[in-house]
Amino acid sequence: MRRRKHNFRFHLGILGALTAVPFILAGAVLAVLYVNSERAATEHDLVNTAKDLSSSIDREITGGLSTLRTLAYAQSLAQGDLAAFYQHASRVAGMFPGSLVGLRRPDGRQLLNTARAWGEPLSQTKDTVLNASDEAALRTMQPVISDLYTGASTGQRYVMLNVPVMYEGAAHFLNIAIPPETFLRLIQQSSAVSQDWLVILIDRNHRVIARTRDHENFVGRSASDGFIQKLTGTEGVVSSTTLDGAPVIDGYYKSPLSGWTVITAMPVSAVNQSVRQAAIAVGAAGALGLICSLLFAVLYSRYVTPPIWRLRDNALALSRRERVASFNTGIVELNAVSETLASASASLIRDEETKSQMIKELNHRVKNSLATVLSIARQSATKADDFTAFFETFSGRLVALSQAHDALSEGEWVEADMAELVQRVCVSVSGPGRIAAKGPPVPLYPRAALTIGMVLHELYTNAAKYGALTQPEGSVAIEWSVQPHAPGGATVTAQWAEQGGPPVTAPERKSFGTRFIEESIRHELKGTATFDFRAEGLIFRCEFPLRQQGLAAGAKAPADTRA
């Protein structure tokens, strides 16, 4: 398909628009993250507020139970003087505004009720909620907290704290009836409740005890079955619709004391408001950014376009083999193009010479590599008892040689860093925490890199077969340093120290690996190597000339590599 042609100014405008897109997307992502964060924080606040309110209600209930227990030990009750006990109970009821204190038989007949004057006839309790409360208290002989019920004497709604007591040798029930408005006041006095929140307290039968909005019309009404099914567990967050039809996000907490559930509800519209605000902010910022990008693109094109046309003229002149002079475009990349056009003819002449030199260098490196592999094969074969042993030793040394080659390849076969070599040959193949390596950057020339790679492989193989790395707690510490002002030039000093392995004893004669290491350091690197066979672990030290300029003491921070 043939592409349409557009000038550079058009493309800069497209680039400016595309540049603004990631920022718009980033703004949208941040807005979404912000909204989600705000929603999570809101849900957290809803649940925590429900917990706090439940704790306040539990404290009120606990205070009422404590008061009833104290009242149960009144001397007048023990002596059967109900008239005096009535006066005492009336004072207790006055401590809880709107509440009443009563004493009932197990069959529901009331002996006294502070809602009625002493001596007035009292009705028999037949409410199923109270009967269930009496049965539970009689069965356990423990205080029981009832759900919402309607009082027989007053016709008002209450919840009852029911305490079993012994009177005249039989179990009776001493109770205090608390109106729902008491709990409503507790909720309304809480500073944690926001003005736009709705707080609802429901009992075990899922009936409303208190509601911060329109309490009088909703108290005693049952929550919907669909909503109740969502209240799984002690606490959580759900979405629902209130009894008056408002969609909300609910945080709830179920009291382990009373079994009542406190529900804190926030209107969904309040949550959506933050979404709308974030969307408006992102849209406005995106539109402004897009307009600015297009405007800047048009202005900048007036600066960039003339040098591009001049470069085109130079390219045409070069095609006619005319002399081309470089010029300053004001842009680094375009300057490079101008300089490239000016030097294009000289580059053509140098191409053939470069190709010939690369072939010679490749031939030289291939010969050196083949000679090294042949030497490794010869040395491995002299000590191998069978083909399997030879293959294991030979392949391991080839891998070490390959790792050294990789490190040199990264340095374009000019040098390889000591830390990189230790990492490839030892640290990367050991288990976590087994080998610790530390030392400054040391640029090794190719022969030194290959030799040190082989020496590290021999030491690691010995440690893995016979030394510290055979034990789970064994470890190896590799350290190296450079003496830049040593006699004869800069010198590298390295140490291999094992610990945590089996006890070490000095061998009666040098092994092939020991001789290989010593001879490699001495012949290949013109250095020295020593082995210290300590009981707690082998310590190997070597020293060899750096033969490489460019390393100054303290020029770089030490490299610290740990497996």
Image: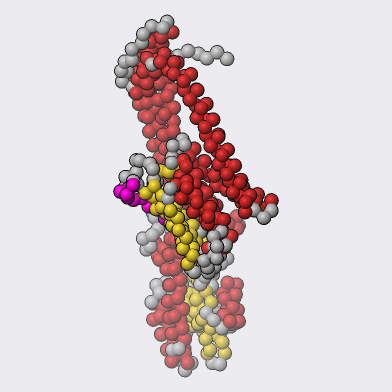
In magenta segment, residue 50: no
Residue 537 sits above or below residue 240 on the image: below
Across and down, in percent, residue 528 comes to 43, 53
Q: Residue furthest bottom?
A: 79
Which image quarter holds the N terminus? top right
Query: Is the residue 428 above or below the residue 374 in the image?
Result: below
Asked if residue 186 is positioned above or below residue 354 in the image, the reply reads below
- Residue at screen point 39% across, 81% down: 91
Image check: 285 left or right of 228? left
Q: Visible in this render: residue 525?
A: yes
Magenta residues? 477-488
Give the camera-side residue of 293 and 326: 326
In the image, residue 293 lies at what x, y percent? Answer: 37, 26
Residue 218, position in %: x, y? 50, 59
- Residue at image location 47% in from the left, 50% down from the top: 521
Q: Is residue 9 visible?
A: no
